[in-house]
Amino acid sequence: LVKVCKIAEGGSVSKHNSTAPQHLQIQLGDYVAAINGCIDNEAITKALEEATSVEMVIRPCVQSMVQVHNKGQALGLDLKYTETQPEITIKSFKPGSPALNKLQPFDRIFAVDSVEQAKAMVDQMKRAQDLQSMSFKVRRAKPFPSSGPVDISSLTRIAKDDRGLLPQPIIPISATALVQIYVRGQPFGGSDKSSSGHRYDTIPIANGMINAGMSCQLIHYVKEEHDTFLEVCKHFKAIVVRCNPGQIKADGGDQVKFDGAMRELRKLGIQ
């Protein structure tokens, strides 16, 4: 994810915002999840600098206050920061981290117990073993209709929106995921996709499952995230695979590797 830190007056984004409805405008603090099918930060940055026409996937940003009751434990966070910057990015969590399920990967911390600036915040976090509880002010991508109940924040959000998707059940009888593949380099991600990046039948299928009392989260398989994808899928009770034959290979992935991962999930009792 690449954060929008500045919008130049008179630039392409500024011109887009001047005519776009409020919900489609790009705001400071928003995250760029993909550009022209590129999802890694270096490729996104390059596309922003060089491309004459871009199709962007934007994840709006929200600000949250998070309380972590660490009870004298070290926080176990893998962080990315520069001492002079105002924010710290969470890369991952170490096993047993008390912050797991409170903070999220890619959260940007801008205050710890009212302490600001990266170096001072890191020093404060090092005091965790002397503290029972710590508060964090974070900026994170805004939740979307299929963002829960299972935490899928470690996966790249490919779809532009989940328009038409019903609200997830508060207490689902089963947690399911519908898996799709977005073929980078093909219009809309493949001939079976609408402009949202979802298959034409994705929303109706998901809504049928939601109406039956199950949750159904919409996710995309991205070959660069294979291992992370597999770990996330282990938290579902069932997986519905909706990837057309040949599309995983067309996106540069390995169909045999993907099929092997699905068989591994089946051995774990995941339907």
Image (tube, helix red, strand yellow):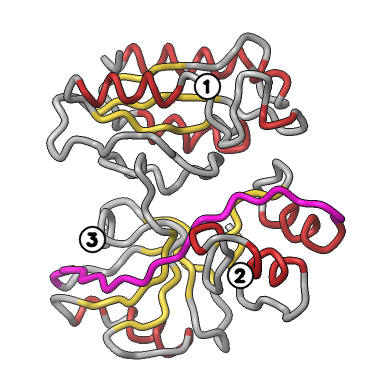
Q: Position of residue 82 (x, y in %)?
A: 58, 80
Q: Nearer the viewer, mark 1 or mark 3?
A: 1
Frontmost residue, 42 versus 174: 174
Is residue 170 positioned above or below 238 on the image?
below
| Amino acid tagged 1 | Tyr
Q: Position of residue 85 (x, y in %)?
A: 56, 84
Per the image, the residue denoted by label 1 is: 200
Answer left or right for 42 relative to 141.
Answer: right
Write the start and end of the magenta stretch as one range.
51-71
Q: Earlier in the sequence, mark 3 or mark 2?
A: 2
Residue found 54% across the figure and 44% down from its top: 160
Per the image, the residue denoted by label 2 is: 4
Q: Which mark is residue 98?
A: 3
Residues packed near mark 3 inside 10 Å, few (<14), some (14 to 19) or many (20 plus): many
Residues packed near mark 2 inside 10 Å, few (<14), some (14 to 19) or many (20 plus): some
Residue found 56% across the figure and 41% down from its top: 158
Q: Position of residue 94 (x, y in %)?
A: 36, 55
Asked if the residue at tag 3 contacts the one at tag 1, i.e. Cβ–Cβ closer than 8 Å, the answer is no
| Amino acid tagged 2 | Val
Q: Position of residue 18 (x, y in %)?
A: 65, 70
- Asked if residue 241 lies in the magenta stretch, the reply is no
Identity of the residue furthest to the top in this view: 245
Frontmost residue, 77 versus 67: 67
CA distance separating discs 1 and 2: 31 Å
Q: Nearer the viewer, mark 3 or mark 2?
A: 2
Is residue 257 positioned above or below 99 on the image?
above
Q: Quadrant of residue 131?
A: bottom left
